[in-house]
Image (tube, rainbow, N blue to C red):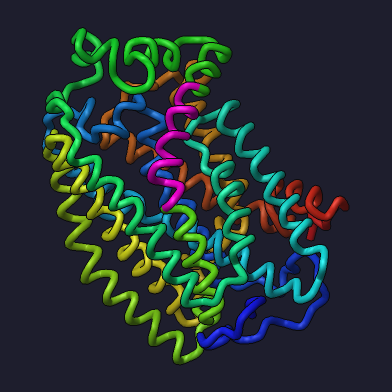
Amino acid sequence: MADGAPDPAPAAPPLDPTPAGPTREGQRIVALDVLRGVAILGILPVNVLSFGLPAAVIEEPVHFMSPARSEAVAHGLLQALFGYKFITIFALLFGAGLALQRARAGDDPAFYPRTGWRLALLAGLGLAHAFGLWHGDVLFFYATIGAVALALSWFPTPALLALGLLGAVAAPAGVLLLMSLAPVPAEVGPRTIEAALAAPDLAGAVGPIGLGREVEVFRGGSYVEMLGIRALHWLYQLGAMLLIFGWRVAGLFFLGIAGQRLGLLRPDERARRVLRALLVGGLLVGLPLEVWQAVVKATGPAPFPTLMRVEAAHQVGSLALALAYASAVLLVPAAWLPKAPLRWLSNVGRLALTNYLVQTVICTFVFYSYGLGLFATLTRVQLWGVALAVWAVQLALSALWLRWFVMGPVEWAWRSLTWLKAQPLRR
Protein backbone atom coordinates (compact mmCIF):
# COMPACT_ATOMS: atom_id res chain seq x y z
CA MET A 1 0.00 0.00 0.00
CA ALA A 2 2.93 2.34 0.62
CA ASP A 3 5.07 4.11 -1.93
CA GLY A 4 8.82 3.56 -2.02
CA ALA A 5 10.73 0.44 -0.98
CA PRO A 6 9.01 -2.96 -0.77
CA ASP A 7 7.26 -3.41 2.54
CA PRO A 8 7.88 -6.70 4.34
CA ALA A 9 4.77 -6.24 6.51
CA PRO A 10 1.53 -8.00 5.50
CA ALA A 11 -0.67 -5.84 3.32
CA ALA A 12 -4.04 -4.58 4.48
CA PRO A 13 -7.11 -6.18 2.90
CA PRO A 14 -7.83 -4.49 -0.43
CA LEU A 15 -10.12 -1.49 -0.47
CA ASP A 16 -13.11 -1.24 -2.75
CA PRO A 17 -11.88 -0.29 -6.25
CA THR A 18 -13.64 3.08 -6.50
CA PRO A 19 -12.49 6.21 -8.29
CA ALA A 20 -10.64 8.86 -6.30
CA GLY A 21 -13.10 11.17 -4.59
CA PRO A 22 -14.76 11.85 -1.25
CA THR A 23 -15.46 8.77 0.84
CA ARG A 24 -18.94 7.51 0.10
CA GLU A 25 -21.30 6.24 2.78
CA GLY A 26 -20.96 2.64 1.63
CA GLN A 27 -17.17 2.81 1.93
CA ARG A 28 -17.18 3.67 5.63
CA ILE A 29 -15.58 1.24 8.08
CA VAL A 30 -18.23 1.01 10.78
CA ALA A 31 -15.80 -0.15 13.48
CA LEU A 32 -13.77 3.03 12.91
CA ASP A 33 -16.89 5.16 13.32
CA VAL A 34 -17.59 3.38 16.62
CA LEU A 35 -13.98 3.95 17.71
CA ARG A 36 -14.17 7.64 16.76
CA GLY A 37 -17.34 7.93 18.82
CA VAL A 38 -15.63 6.30 21.79
CA ALA A 39 -12.67 8.68 21.41
CA ILE A 40 -14.78 11.85 21.08
CA LEU A 41 -16.90 11.02 24.12
CA GLY A 42 -13.88 9.79 26.08
CA ILE A 43 -11.88 13.01 25.74
CA LEU A 44 -14.70 15.12 27.18
CA PRO A 45 -14.36 14.27 30.91
CA VAL A 46 -10.68 15.23 30.70
CA ASN A 47 -11.33 18.41 28.72
CA VAL A 48 -14.05 19.48 31.15
CA LEU A 49 -11.29 20.13 33.70
CA SER A 50 -9.74 22.63 31.30
CA PHE A 51 -13.10 24.21 30.48
CA GLY A 52 -14.20 24.54 34.09
CA LEU A 53 -11.04 25.15 36.14
CA PRO A 54 -8.02 27.49 35.96
CA ALA A 55 -5.05 26.49 33.81
CA ALA A 56 -2.93 25.54 36.81
CA VAL A 57 -5.01 22.39 37.25
CA ILE A 58 -3.11 20.95 34.29
CA GLU A 59 0.26 21.61 35.92
CA GLU A 60 -0.65 20.23 39.34
CA PRO A 61 -3.67 17.89 39.38
CA VAL A 62 -4.60 18.50 43.01
CA HIS A 63 -4.80 22.28 42.74
CA PHE A 64 -8.30 23.38 43.73
CA MET A 65 -9.41 19.90 44.84
CA SER A 66 -11.17 19.72 48.18
CA PRO A 67 -10.08 17.06 50.72
CA ALA A 68 -13.39 15.15 50.34
CA ARG A 69 -12.85 11.47 49.55
CA SER A 70 -15.33 11.67 46.67
CA GLU A 71 -13.11 14.25 44.99
CA ALA A 72 -10.06 11.99 45.12
CA VAL A 73 -12.08 9.05 43.80
CA ALA A 74 -13.59 11.11 40.96
CA HIS A 75 -10.20 12.47 39.95
CA GLY A 76 -8.48 9.10 40.37
CA LEU A 77 -10.96 7.38 38.05
CA LEU A 78 -10.50 10.16 35.51
CA GLN A 79 -6.72 9.85 35.56
CA ALA A 80 -6.62 6.04 35.56
CA LEU A 81 -9.21 5.26 32.89
CA PHE A 82 -9.56 8.42 30.78
CA GLY A 83 -6.56 10.74 31.04
CA TYR A 84 -4.50 10.69 27.82
CA LYS A 85 -6.16 7.47 26.58
CA PHE A 86 -8.89 8.77 24.30
CA ILE A 87 -6.91 11.63 22.81
CA THR A 88 -4.30 8.95 22.06
CA ILE A 89 -6.94 6.92 20.21
CA PHE A 90 -8.03 10.07 18.39
CA ALA A 91 -4.46 10.68 17.20
CA LEU A 92 -4.01 7.06 16.13
CA LEU A 93 -7.23 7.36 14.10
CA PHE A 94 -6.01 10.58 12.49
CA GLY A 95 -2.88 8.83 11.25
CA ALA A 96 -4.88 5.81 10.10
CA GLY A 97 -7.24 8.17 8.28
CA LEU A 98 -4.35 9.71 6.36
CA ALA A 99 -3.23 6.22 5.34
CA LEU A 100 -6.75 5.23 4.25
CA GLN A 101 -7.07 8.37 2.12
CA ARG A 102 -3.69 7.68 0.55
CA ALA A 103 -4.67 4.09 -0.24
CA ARG A 104 -8.01 5.10 -1.75
CA ALA A 105 -6.36 7.78 -3.90
CA GLY A 106 -4.17 5.21 -5.65
CA ASP A 107 -1.98 6.98 -8.21
CA ASP A 108 -4.04 10.18 -8.21
CA PRO A 109 -1.41 12.96 -8.69
CA ALA A 110 -3.72 15.47 -6.99
CA PHE A 111 -3.74 13.59 -3.68
CA TYR A 112 -0.87 15.41 -1.98
CA PRO A 113 -1.83 18.98 -2.95
CA ARG A 114 -5.49 18.27 -2.15
CA THR A 115 -4.63 16.76 1.23
CA GLY A 116 -2.29 19.66 1.97
CA TRP A 117 -5.18 22.04 1.26
CA ARG A 118 -7.45 19.91 3.46
CA LEU A 119 -4.96 20.08 6.34
CA ALA A 120 -4.58 23.85 5.84
CA LEU A 121 -8.35 24.22 6.20
CA LEU A 122 -8.22 22.16 9.39
CA ALA A 123 -5.39 24.32 10.73
CA GLY A 124 -7.43 27.45 10.08
CA LEU A 125 -10.44 25.95 11.84
CA GLY A 126 -8.20 25.02 14.75
CA LEU A 127 -6.88 28.55 15.15
CA ALA A 128 -10.40 29.96 15.02
CA HIS A 129 -11.46 27.42 17.64
CA ALA A 130 -8.46 28.13 19.89
CA PHE A 131 -8.69 31.91 19.89
CA GLY A 132 -12.44 32.26 19.43
CA LEU A 133 -13.68 29.67 21.93
CA TRP A 134 -11.15 27.55 23.83
CA HIS A 135 -7.36 27.51 24.04
CA GLY A 136 -7.21 23.70 24.43
CA ASP A 137 -7.79 23.07 20.70
CA VAL A 138 -5.84 20.22 19.09
CA LEU A 139 -6.98 20.66 15.47
CA PHE A 140 -4.26 23.18 14.53
CA PHE A 141 -1.53 20.94 15.91
CA TYR A 142 -2.99 17.84 14.29
CA ALA A 143 -3.10 19.60 10.93
CA THR A 144 0.49 20.89 11.07
CA ILE A 145 1.99 17.68 12.46
CA GLY A 146 -0.22 15.68 10.10
CA ALA A 147 1.48 17.39 7.15
CA VAL A 148 4.84 16.09 8.41
CA ALA A 149 3.42 12.60 8.92
CA LEU A 150 1.95 12.64 5.43
CA ALA A 151 5.28 13.66 3.92
CA LEU A 152 6.99 10.71 5.64
CA SER A 153 4.17 8.20 5.12
CA TRP A 154 6.08 6.50 2.26
CA PHE A 155 8.52 5.03 4.82
CA PRO A 156 8.40 1.22 5.17
CA THR A 157 6.12 -0.04 7.91
CA PRO A 158 8.93 -1.16 10.27
CA ALA A 159 10.43 2.33 10.07
CA LEU A 160 7.06 3.91 10.81
CA LEU A 161 6.62 1.62 13.83
CA ALA A 162 10.08 2.59 15.10
CA LEU A 163 9.41 6.31 14.56
CA GLY A 164 6.02 5.89 16.20
CA LEU A 165 7.38 4.35 19.37
CA LEU A 166 10.23 6.85 19.48
CA GLY A 167 7.87 9.79 19.17
CA ALA A 168 4.93 8.50 21.21
CA VAL A 169 6.90 7.12 24.15
CA ALA A 170 10.68 7.48 24.16
CA ALA A 171 11.05 11.17 23.28
CA PRO A 172 8.38 12.63 25.62
CA ALA A 173 9.30 10.26 28.44
CA GLY A 174 12.97 11.18 28.03
CA VAL A 175 12.20 14.89 28.19
CA LEU A 176 10.10 14.41 31.32
CA LEU A 177 12.85 12.38 33.00
CA LEU A 178 15.34 15.15 32.24
CA MET A 179 12.90 17.68 33.69
CA SER A 180 12.72 15.60 36.88
CA LEU A 181 16.35 16.60 37.53
CA ALA A 182 15.46 20.30 37.68
CA PRO A 183 15.58 21.94 41.15
CA VAL A 184 11.94 23.03 41.47
CA PRO A 185 10.40 24.08 44.82
CA ALA A 186 7.81 21.82 46.42
CA GLU A 187 4.22 22.36 45.32
CA VAL A 188 1.61 23.82 47.64
CA GLY A 189 -1.05 21.55 49.07
CA PRO A 190 -4.54 21.09 47.70
CA ARG A 191 -6.83 24.08 48.12
CA THR A 192 -10.33 25.06 47.16
CA ILE A 193 -10.70 27.84 44.60
CA GLU A 194 -11.71 30.41 47.20
CA ALA A 195 -8.84 29.45 49.51
CA ALA A 196 -6.41 29.68 46.61
CA LEU A 197 -7.71 33.12 45.64
CA ALA A 198 -7.20 34.27 49.22
CA ALA A 199 -3.59 33.06 49.26
CA PRO A 200 -1.15 35.63 47.87
CA ASP A 201 1.35 32.92 46.88
CA LEU A 202 -1.23 31.46 44.49
CA ALA A 203 -3.60 34.22 43.47
CA GLY A 204 -1.00 36.15 41.52
CA ALA A 205 1.37 33.50 40.25
CA VAL A 206 -0.32 30.26 39.19
CA GLY A 207 -0.34 29.28 35.52
CA PRO A 208 0.53 31.54 32.58
CA ILE A 209 -1.66 34.31 34.03
CA GLY A 210 -2.58 35.26 37.57
CA LEU A 211 -5.19 32.98 39.09
CA GLY A 212 -7.34 35.84 40.35
CA ARG A 213 -7.43 37.54 36.97
CA GLU A 214 -8.24 34.30 35.16
CA VAL A 215 -11.16 33.49 37.45
CA GLU A 216 -12.43 37.06 37.35
CA VAL A 217 -12.46 37.22 33.55
CA PHE A 218 -13.97 33.82 32.82
CA ARG A 219 -16.63 34.21 35.50
CA GLY A 220 -17.67 37.75 34.65
CA GLY A 221 -15.41 39.36 32.06
CA SER A 222 -16.03 40.40 28.47
CA TYR A 223 -15.42 38.27 25.40
CA VAL A 224 -12.48 40.50 24.42
CA GLU A 225 -10.86 39.98 27.83
CA MET A 226 -11.28 36.23 27.43
CA LEU A 227 -9.71 36.41 23.98
CA GLY A 228 -6.56 37.93 25.48
CA ILE A 229 -6.28 35.22 28.13
CA ARG A 230 -6.93 32.47 25.57
CA ALA A 231 -4.10 33.84 23.44
CA LEU A 232 -1.70 33.69 26.42
CA HIS A 233 -2.81 30.17 27.28
CA TRP A 234 -2.40 29.04 23.67
CA LEU A 235 1.13 30.43 23.44
CA TYR A 236 1.95 28.79 26.75
CA GLN A 237 0.56 25.51 25.41
CA LEU A 238 2.62 25.92 22.24
CA GLY A 239 5.79 25.53 24.29
CA ALA A 240 4.54 22.25 25.78
CA MET A 241 3.57 21.11 22.28
CA LEU A 242 7.05 21.75 20.91
CA LEU A 243 8.74 20.15 23.92
CA ILE A 244 6.59 17.08 24.65
CA PHE A 245 3.16 16.76 23.09
CA GLY A 246 4.27 17.33 19.50
CA TRP A 247 6.57 14.30 19.63
CA ARG A 248 3.74 12.27 21.06
CA VAL A 249 1.25 13.30 18.36
CA ALA A 250 3.70 12.66 15.52
CA GLY A 251 4.52 9.23 16.91
CA LEU A 252 0.87 8.33 17.22
CA PHE A 253 0.23 9.41 13.64
CA PHE A 254 3.02 7.12 12.46
CA LEU A 255 1.63 4.24 14.51
CA GLY A 256 -1.82 4.85 13.03
CA ILE A 257 -0.44 4.77 9.49
CA ALA A 258 1.41 1.54 10.26
CA GLY A 259 -1.71 0.02 11.82
CA GLN A 260 -3.70 0.66 8.67
CA ARG A 261 -1.00 -0.98 6.53
CA LEU A 262 -0.93 -4.01 8.82
CA GLY A 263 -4.63 -4.54 8.23
CA LEU A 264 -5.73 -3.82 11.81
CA LEU A 265 -8.67 -1.67 10.71
CA ARG A 266 -10.25 -4.48 8.69
CA PRO A 267 -8.71 -7.43 10.50
CA ASP A 268 -8.31 -10.89 9.05
CA GLU A 269 -7.46 -13.74 11.41
CA ARG A 270 -3.77 -12.83 11.53
CA ALA A 271 -4.56 -9.20 12.34
CA ARG A 272 -7.08 -10.33 14.96
CA ARG A 273 -4.31 -12.25 16.71
CA VAL A 274 -2.28 -9.04 16.80
CA LEU A 275 -5.27 -7.14 18.21
CA ARG A 276 -5.84 -9.78 20.89
CA ALA A 277 -2.17 -9.51 21.89
CA LEU A 278 -2.47 -5.70 22.08
CA LEU A 279 -5.62 -6.03 24.16
CA VAL A 280 -4.11 -8.41 26.70
CA GLY A 281 -0.66 -6.81 26.73
CA GLY A 282 -2.12 -3.32 26.93
CA LEU A 283 -4.20 -4.21 29.96
CA LEU A 284 -1.33 -6.01 31.70
CA VAL A 285 1.11 -3.15 31.14
CA GLY A 286 -1.15 -0.14 31.03
CA LEU A 287 -3.62 -0.72 33.84
CA PRO A 288 -1.08 -1.05 36.71
CA LEU A 289 0.92 1.96 35.47
CA GLU A 290 -2.18 4.10 35.04
CA VAL A 291 -3.66 3.16 38.40
CA TRP A 292 -0.33 3.98 40.04
CA GLN A 293 0.00 7.39 38.41
CA ALA A 294 -3.65 8.15 39.19
CA VAL A 295 -3.17 7.38 42.89
CA VAL A 296 -0.06 9.58 43.02
CA LYS A 297 -1.86 12.48 41.34
CA ALA A 298 -5.14 12.16 43.24
CA THR A 299 -3.48 11.95 46.65
CA GLY A 300 -0.72 14.54 46.02
CA PRO A 301 0.72 17.02 45.79
CA ALA A 302 3.82 15.11 44.73
CA PRO A 303 7.25 16.74 44.61
CA PHE A 304 8.11 18.00 41.14
CA PRO A 305 10.76 15.32 40.38
CA THR A 306 8.31 12.58 41.41
CA LEU A 307 5.55 14.09 39.30
CA MET A 308 7.81 14.22 36.23
CA ARG A 309 8.79 10.56 36.69
CA VAL A 310 5.13 9.65 37.07
CA GLU A 311 4.36 11.57 33.87
CA ALA A 312 7.13 9.67 32.07
CA ALA A 313 5.53 6.36 33.11
CA HIS A 314 2.18 7.83 32.06
CA GLN A 315 3.46 8.09 28.48
CA VAL A 316 3.91 4.31 28.44
CA GLY A 317 0.82 3.33 30.41
CA SER A 318 -1.61 5.59 28.58
CA LEU A 319 -0.48 4.30 25.16
CA ALA A 320 -0.71 0.69 26.31
CA LEU A 321 -4.22 1.16 27.70
CA ALA A 322 -5.36 3.18 24.68
CA LEU A 323 -4.21 0.35 22.40
CA ALA A 324 -6.15 -2.10 24.57
CA TYR A 325 -9.30 0.02 24.31
CA ALA A 326 -8.95 0.39 20.54
CA SER A 327 -8.23 -3.31 20.06
CA ALA A 328 -11.33 -4.24 22.05
CA VAL A 329 -13.50 -2.17 19.69
CA LEU A 330 -11.83 -3.50 16.53
CA LEU A 331 -12.38 -7.07 17.74
CA VAL A 332 -16.13 -6.61 18.13
CA PRO A 333 -17.98 -8.97 15.74
CA ALA A 334 -19.25 -7.12 12.69
CA ALA A 335 -22.81 -8.31 13.32
CA TRP A 336 -22.90 -6.35 16.59
CA LEU A 337 -21.86 -3.00 15.11
CA PRO A 338 -25.24 -1.90 13.65
CA LYS A 339 -27.01 -2.61 16.96
CA ALA A 340 -27.46 -0.37 19.99
CA PRO A 341 -25.47 0.79 21.89
CA LEU A 342 -22.64 0.48 19.33
CA ARG A 343 -24.83 2.17 16.71
CA TRP A 344 -25.19 5.18 19.01
CA LEU A 345 -21.40 5.42 19.32
CA SER A 346 -21.06 5.08 15.55
CA ASN A 347 -23.43 8.03 15.09
CA VAL A 348 -21.23 10.19 17.33
CA GLY A 349 -18.13 9.04 15.43
CA ARG A 350 -19.59 9.90 12.04
CA LEU A 351 -20.01 13.47 13.31
CA ALA A 352 -16.67 13.47 15.13
CA LEU A 353 -15.45 16.94 14.11
CA THR A 354 -18.85 18.53 14.64
CA ASN A 355 -19.23 16.85 18.03
CA TYR A 356 -15.74 17.94 19.11
CA LEU A 357 -16.65 21.56 18.43
CA VAL A 358 -20.15 21.20 19.92
CA GLN A 359 -18.54 20.06 23.16
CA THR A 360 -16.67 23.36 23.25
CA VAL A 361 -19.81 25.39 22.51
CA ILE A 362 -21.78 23.68 25.28
CA CYS A 363 -19.01 23.72 27.88
CA THR A 364 -17.97 27.32 27.30
CA PHE A 365 -21.63 28.33 27.67
CA VAL A 366 -21.81 26.43 30.97
CA PHE A 367 -18.59 27.86 32.40
CA TYR A 368 -17.94 31.28 30.82
CA SER A 369 -19.49 34.64 31.59
CA TYR A 370 -21.54 34.85 28.38
CA GLY A 371 -23.44 31.76 29.59
CA LEU A 372 -23.96 30.39 33.08
CA GLY A 373 -20.63 31.66 34.42
CA LEU A 374 -19.84 28.54 36.48
CA PHE A 375 -16.07 28.75 35.90
CA ALA A 376 -14.11 27.55 38.94
CA THR A 377 -17.23 26.80 40.97
CA LEU A 378 -17.84 23.05 40.45
CA THR A 379 -16.21 20.10 42.20
CA ARG A 380 -14.62 17.17 40.39
CA VAL A 381 -17.77 15.12 41.00
CA GLN A 382 -19.95 17.90 39.55
CA LEU A 383 -17.66 18.19 36.53
CA TRP A 384 -18.31 14.51 35.86
CA GLY A 385 -22.00 15.37 35.90
CA VAL A 386 -21.45 17.99 33.21
CA ALA A 387 -19.60 15.46 31.05
CA LEU A 388 -22.35 12.86 31.42
CA ALA A 389 -25.01 15.41 30.48
CA VAL A 390 -23.10 16.42 27.34
CA TRP A 391 -22.70 12.74 26.43
CA ALA A 392 -26.47 12.28 26.59
CA VAL A 393 -27.06 15.35 24.42
CA GLN A 394 -24.54 14.28 21.80
CA LEU A 395 -25.76 10.69 21.60
CA ALA A 396 -29.32 11.91 21.06
CA LEU A 397 -28.53 14.73 18.62
CA SER A 398 -26.14 12.63 16.54
CA ALA A 399 -28.80 9.95 15.99
CA LEU A 400 -31.40 12.59 15.17
CA TRP A 401 -29.15 14.45 12.71
CA LEU A 402 -28.22 11.31 10.80
CA ARG A 403 -31.87 10.50 10.14
CA TRP A 404 -31.89 13.30 7.55
CA PHE A 405 -28.25 13.99 6.73
CA VAL A 406 -25.29 11.84 5.69
CA MET A 407 -22.61 13.77 7.58
CA GLY A 408 -22.20 16.54 10.14
CA PRO A 409 -22.39 20.22 9.19
CA VAL A 410 -18.71 20.88 9.91
CA GLU A 411 -17.67 17.72 8.06
CA TRP A 412 -19.80 18.85 5.11
CA ALA A 413 -18.21 22.31 5.00
CA TRP A 414 -14.69 20.87 5.33
CA ARG A 415 -15.26 18.27 2.63
CA SER A 416 -16.94 20.78 0.28
CA LEU A 417 -14.07 23.25 0.65
CA THR A 418 -11.52 20.47 0.17
CA TRP A 419 -13.05 19.45 -3.16
CA LEU A 420 -14.12 23.02 -4.03
CA LYS A 421 -17.58 21.67 -4.73
CA ALA A 422 -20.66 21.38 -2.56
CA GLN A 423 -21.02 17.77 -1.42
CA PRO A 424 -24.34 15.93 -0.93
CA LEU A 425 -25.66 16.47 2.58
CA ARG A 426 -29.30 15.37 2.73
CA ARG A 427 -30.27 11.72 2.52
- Residue lying at 60% horizontally and 67% vertically, measured from the top left: 153
Q: Is residue 243 magenta?
A: yes
- Residue 62's x, y, as percent? 20, 32
Single out the residue that lies furthest toward the bottom.
Answer: 269
**Left or right, residue 426 beside residue 303:** right
Residue 87 seen in the figure = no
Query: Which of the pair 239/389 is nearer the observer?
Result: 239
Where does the magenta region start and end?
232-247
Residue 308 seen in the figure = yes
Picture quadrant of residue 48: top left
Query: Which of the pair 152/104 is nearer the observer?
Result: 152
- Residue 164's x, y, as percent? 44, 64
- Residue 299's x, y, as percent? 12, 39
Name above or below for residue 245 compared with residue 8: above
**Left or right, residue 390 beside residue 211:** right
Total marks in image: 0
- Residue lying at 69% horizontally and 58% vertically, measured from the top left: 403
Q: Is residue 364 magenta?
A: no
Name above or below for residue 13 compared with residue 172: below
Q: Which quadrant, please, contains the N terminus?
A: bottom right
Name above or below for residue 335 compared with residue 93: below
- Residue lying at 25% horizontally and 19% vertically, measured from the top left: 193
- Residue 358's x, y, as percent? 57, 40
**Left or right, residue 166 beside residue 381:** right
Name above or below for residue 29 compared with residue 187: below
